[in-house]
Image (tube, coloured by chain):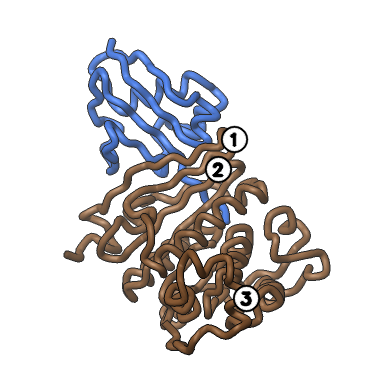
Amino acid sequence: MNGENRMLSERERQRYMRQLSLIGDEGQERLRSASVCVAGAGGLGSPVSLYLAAAGIGHIRLIDPDRVERSNLNRQVLHAEPDISRFKVESAADKLRALNPDIQIEPIPVAIHDENSLRMTSGMDLLVDALDSYQARYLLNRVAYIQNIPLVHAAVSGFHGQLTTVIPGETACLQCTMPYPPEGKSPPVLGATAGVVGILQALEVIKLLLHVGDVARNVLLVWDGKCGRLDQIPIERDPGCPVCGSSD
Amino acid sequence: MVTIKVRAFARFRELFGDSFEIQVSTPATMHSVIQAVGKRNERGLPELMDGEGKIIRSVIILVNRERITGERREEHSVAGGDEVAIYPPVAGG
């Protein structure tokens, strides 16, 4: 938490009026005090960060090394035609600041790798996996475990998506859940699929920060957009997991 | 022959059907069950098994809601009445 604990301003009261009766001043202040790292500013990162910014998450760190391409625009709804060739995190930051000037957006246009992963995630209350490669996902999972930071994972393909929330030391981690990455690169993705699943991720983040409801612990939520169904697949910690197996 | 219940999720639901039963010769193994599922749709078979006829490693398989993992899961015994659930994890962001 970033330690800002002043009372809500009149502007904040107006902005959050329709949710204050739901979560209270205390809940809103909790969201404002939170620091969330969104790794990936693409198909999932766009809806996640939009809804986190709108909800009033006080500090959003956006990490992505890529620049906007025209072929991103069917699903990466934070970016538009004039943003082509800009860093995605810079394009995203502009939109998020316009949406909510009362929060801090920290765009970092680099890739997460072994050497910088601790620095990229330090001081964060939550990590959001909105990445597009399992190599980077496994690294984020490891660093979440090392730093004891909850991680909300999601991935999408076509009309389908999946989500799980990792609480280090308590739940199955991403490596337990998917010890082998799916094959293939750059699957087709419908923008609406990334939208549904990304917004589910934002909801997980908000629930985790507010300690309300149930999150997807030890369960893989599977969104089937063709049938309009959300299924739950039980998952469990693997005692032999190279990341989290030796704890307890 | 034994009857195995299968539940398929997401892309596998699209390829093989939502919830169905298959007949497999005894002794039934995970390999024979997955092979029988693949026969329901030739187009879908490459998403379940590789060119050598091995179950693709990333595919999540549960029997009676219990995860079946490890190098020897092909040989895992499956009994009549068991429910096998299959899901192919996705990668895009």
Image quadrant assignment for residue A215: bottom left
Q: Residue A116, can we see it?
A: no
Which of discs 1 and 3 lies nearer the camera? The answer is 3
Residue at 34% from the left image edge and 21% from the top image edge: B5
Mark 1 or mark 3: name the one nearer the start of the chain.
Answer: 3
Q: Amino acid at mark 2?
A: His
Which amino acid lies under the numbered mark 3 shown in the image of this protein? Gln
Mark 2 or mark 3, whichever is nearer to me: 3
Query: Which circle marks residue A226 in the picture?
Result: 1
Which residue is labeled 2 in the image? A160
Q: Whole-Å distance between the Cαs marked 2 and 3?
A: 37 Å
Chain letter of the residue carrying label 1: A
Q: Is residue A242 above or below residue B27?
A: below
Q: Badge 1, how many Cα within 10 Å: few under 14, some, many 20+?
A: some
Q: Residue furthest top?
A: B1
Does B5 appear above or below A175? above
Of residues A172 and A209, the one nearer the viewer is: A209
Task: Give the drawing colour for chain A.
Answer: brown
Determine the residue positioned at 35% across, 56% down. Answer: A175
**Do callouts 1 and 2 mark residues in contact (Cβ within 8 Å)?**
yes
* Residue sitting nearer the eye, A185 or A5: A5
Secondary element type, mark 3: helix
Q: Quadrant of residue A11?
A: bottom right
Question: SS of the residue at dot 1?
Answer: loop
Real-space Cα distance between discs 1 and 3?
38 Å
Residue ID for mark 3: A14
Q: Nearer the viewer, residue A164 or B22?
A: A164
